[in-house]
Amino acid sequence: MQVKKLHFDDNDPSFCESTLIIEDDEDIRESFKFALEFEGYRVFTACNGKDAISVLSKIPKPCLIFLDLMMPVMNGVEFLKAIENEKAYSSIPVVVVSAFTDRAKNIKVNQIVSKPIDLAKVLDIAKEYCAH
Amino acid sequence: MNEDFINQEHEPISTEDLSSILRQLIDAISRAQEGQAGLEEIYKEALYSLKKATNVERASILLFDPDRVMRFKSWLGLSETYRKAVEGHTPWSPEDESPDPIVVTDIYKDETLEKYYPIFQAENMSALAFIPLLYRKKVIGKFMLYSRVPYDFTADMTSTLAIAQLVGYAVIRNKIEMEREEYLRKETEARLYAERNVELRDEFLAIASHELKTPLTPLLLNFQLVKKYLKSMEDEIPKARLMLHLFSNVDHQFDKFIRLVDNLLDVSRINAGSFTVRKEKINLSNLILEIFQKFELDLKKMEYVVDKNIEENIFINADTIKLEQVFCNLISNAMKYGLGNPISITFKKLNDKIHFEITDHGIGIAKEDFAKLFKRFERVSSIEYYGGLGLGLYISKNIVEAHGGQLTVDSEEGKWTTFTVEFPIHEISFKDIDESQIWTH
């Protein structure tokens, strides 16, 4: 199978292949990360909204955030509110990945994906937002 | 009657005075009925009425309690010692029908009362009258009249009986009222309890479906990844192809599982009024064909012969995923209950409707079960033979109705069943996307 060539040069301004997965369930996080890495994306992970804010400050700006909603400490909705006024982050496209997609109806996100995740669908989404 | 026996100067009461006394008592009873007075006040009023109507100085009201013991409810001029000593004594049982009043003109001449002499002496009593309080001829209690000197109460009987009748009525009215209130209270309690249980069940459904999805997510994701790996190497490693073949029905089972979990979630959404459909213009003919193709393999395996007649290019403004759910449900039901006999599917424009119907020739449904079919958690088929949550048709009907359509059934038990879905043609507009329509059930 053809594995994409990885771009890990943080200084490359055209670099836009990293994604951030914010998900509290470790198994889901790891499988999801693995699936995206398998396609050649660089993947960062965070286990809740608060963790994600801390991760975001240390990594190159991702081209896409996959966001779970129900999480301890800081949930998905709170995370979106927290980065709303942060210029650096508010422009990053967000795809909500949740079993309770109803809860995402009133929040402004780029796309909503229902759990259990359809691999082909999320790969299509990643391709759409991380194209360069 | 010897003049000395009379405890007071007593002229028989005039009809006018008795009427006025009874009127006052009736007033008290009316006030009690309106909730402005209690039984206690009626008893007191009755005793005062007696006193006024008969010049009796001392009187009491006793009623049978539920344990069949006659107990004092109200009294005038009686000591506690006396009440304690005689409580429970009664010449009648609750079963006695319309007994006559008993008048004891001189206690000390009645030997049957001998054992009570010391009590009567201590209470300074010489004459007694027992007047039964009746309801539907049965004894519910009694009036007691007392005199210090020997006395014949017969002269007072007309007034006393009239008062007794009113009190008997008031007591029973009150009892009925209390029982009614108690019944209503219990009924409200039961209703609230049932409502709370339904609420808890719906809440549980929402949580359970979420919790079931959590382990399913990495499971499915990893499964899909493994398949992807295997597919990438199937040309190089022969066993990869075999493994892919083995996995083919795992996909199918995952689909089934997800459908079940989604059904639970849908029910909780419908109940919470948060079920939404997102309409866009779709080619319903193509959608039905695609769904049918999904089932084709299973239909073949189960040796079903399907006669399908699908008119091409019928468009509708609808939620693809939700309608897919409806048609999947109807086809899988036909397979489940069709006993392997031919199935026919028709999709066409009919008059001013978009018309879909599916007929199987299986177990059929009794006419009296038609309404039950579409209720949640209801199932018409026996759990002994057929599985399922009993949600499919309930959800399907709700989805079809959210699109302005109708889902109906017709059947002959043991012969055939037809489910029909109809959408009005005017529902089709060619706007690309309708706003998500919040549909409150």
Image (spheres, rainbow, N blue to C red):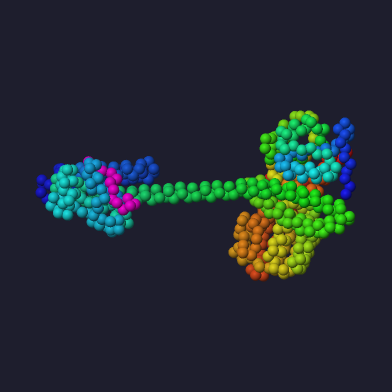
Question: In x, y percent, where is residue B156?
Answer: 20, 49
- Give the x, y percent position of residue B264: 66, 51
Q: Position of residue B118 (x, y in %)?
A: 16, 46
* Residue B6 covered by magenta stretch: no
Left or right? Give the position of B72 relative to A43: left
Q: Residue at x 66, y 45 (%)?
A: B274
| Residue at 74% over, 37% down | A46
Nearer to the camera, B216 or B176: B216
Q: Nearer the viewer, residue A132 or B150?
A: A132
The reply, left or right, for residue B173 in relation to residue B409 is left
Query: Which residue: 83% across, 45% down?
Result: A38
Is B75 contained in the magenta span?
A: yes
Determine which quarter of the picture holds residue B52.
top left
B193 relative position to B52: left or right: right
Residue B2 in sight: yes
Res A116 visible: no
Q: Is residue B220 above or below residue A85?
A: below
Residue at 68 percent of width and 54 percent of height = B260
Q: Quadrant of the C terminus of chain A?
A: top right
Q: Which residues are magenta?
A: B65-78
In the picture, measured across the screen, residue B296 lies left or right of residue B209, that is: right
Q: Where does residue B290 sit, x and y in percent of width and height? A: 79, 57
